[in-house]
Every structure is written in C-alpha cells, then in structure tokens.
Amino acid sequence: MKASARYVKIVEWSDEDQCFVGSCPGLFYGGTHGDDEQTVFAELCQLVDEIIDLYQADVKPLPPPTAGKDYANKMLNVA
C-alpha cells in the first residue's frame, strides 16, 4: 500500500470557481482544479504522492493519516 492511501482526497464542484477543485485535508492546503472531475482526481493523487516524497526527502514526519476516519458519515450527522 502506498503512503498516499492513508490520506483522504476530495474532488468537488466549486460554484465560485466554476470548476472541480481537488484537495487533501490534513496533508496540504490548496490543490488542483479543472473542468474534468476524473482528471482533477488523477492530478490530485499525483500531487499527494509528490508531497509525500518531499516530506520523506526532507526527513520530516508525515501529518497524521486522515483515511479511515469515516468523515462522510460524521458530516451527515452534522447536517
């Protein structure tokens, strides 16, 4: 399993930006954006891998994983 699998990746439509926006909460701010949801997700996955490589090259500990926290159901309970 790749280290990137431990981080939640989100792609959602932004009315403000009129495009899909990809982010990886807990690992980095910002992300990728574009008109095609699948392309944005692929770019996001690549970016997550690159960020993890940078952490490892700098011998810095990775932030705590965000996968497996069941965020989707927790958000449903808040709404």
Image (cartoon, rainbow, N blue to C red):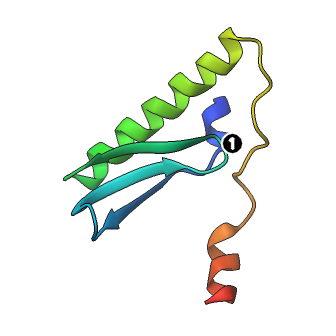
- Tell me the SS state at disc 1: helix
Q: Which residue is drawn at 73% across and 57% down?
A: 68
Image-based side of 13 in relation to 28, left or right: left
Q: Which amino acid does label 1 sit on?
A: Arg
Image x and y of residue 33, in percent: 31, 47
Instruction: Check the image and report above or below for 47 versus 57.
Output: below
Instruction: Check the image and report above or below for 46 versus 38.
Output: above
Q: Which residue is drawn at 29% across and 49% down?
A: 38
Q: Residue at x 56, y 26 (%)?
A: 51
Image x and y of residue 18, in percent: 21, 63
User: Split into 4 quadrants, where in the image is the N terminus?
Assistant: top right
Crowd around label 1: few <14 · some 14–19 · many ≥20 (10 Å): few
Residue tagged by mark 1?
A: 6
Image x and y of residue 75, in percent: 64, 78
Q: Can I make out residue 1 in this image?
A: no
Q: Residue at x 79, y 42 (%)?
A: 64
